[in-house]
Amino acid sequence: MVDKNVINCPSCGAKNAGDAKRCGSCGATLEELQPINDAQRERERRYQQEGFSLGWAGIALGVQAVLTAAIIVALPSAVGSLDFEGYYGMTLVIPVWFVGGLLVGLISPGKTFVEPVVAAFIVAMPTIFYLYNGIFGVLGPGQTVRTMPIFMYVIMAIIGVMFSLVGSYVGERIQLGPPPKTLA
């Protein structure tokens, strides 16, 4: 039988009077135990990811890989005056991964923030290798001009991965629309 005049502290488990604001044992606030109405709970959960989807991670990986390969590898091959080695290539992948995250956020049926980030992280590794070593990095000479040390490639890749998170969040916000208005 549950006594409504007694509240167990969520921090230490001590029993307190039903009208207590703080725990008599540890001092934790007991007001947080009030039930949250369903509308407020729904607003809070609206933008939270509920799980990791391997299917959407695969789709995000495909989107990120195709966009990166098209811009960093294919475009310079098609237009000879473009050369995305070193700094220029790493600077260009940041908005490319943002757009990849944005696209996945727009087309996914659920909340998918993590999947584009994982995909961008996976795509970042060969991208760093390609841009640092050039096309012939393993077989012969690498870049014609090495513009940055390797740690800068890693830092810029991390920034690009974070931008894919921002892009996926923006895509989800666009897809879900504005939050519902409150009556209060």
Image (cartoon, rainbow, N blue to C red):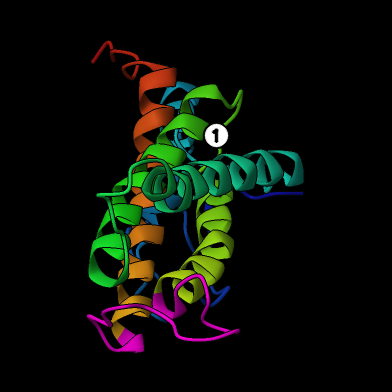
Q: Label 1 belongs to which residue?
A: 111
Location of residue 124 with respect to 107 vertically, above or below: below
In this view, the residue in front, 9 or 68, is 68
Residue under the image location 38 percent in, 68 percent down:
157
Point out the stretch of residues depicted in magenta.
Answer: 132-151
> Could you tell whether 21 is left or right of 128 in the image?
left
Q: Residue at x 50, y 70 (%)?
A: 135
Q: Quadrant of the C terminus?
A: top left
Kind of residue sitting beneath label 1: Lys
Magenta-colored segment: predominant secondary structure: loop
Task: Give residue 127's position: percent from left, percent from top.
Answer: 48, 65
Residue 48 location (% of width, % of height): 49, 41
Residue at x 29% of width, y 58% of height: 83
Instruction: Look at the picture and state if 77 lies above or below 28.
Output: above
Verify whether residue 67 appears in magenta. Answer: no
Q: How many marks?
A: 1
Q: Is residue 4 visible?
A: no
Residue at horizontal 25 percent and vertical 49 percent from the top = 81
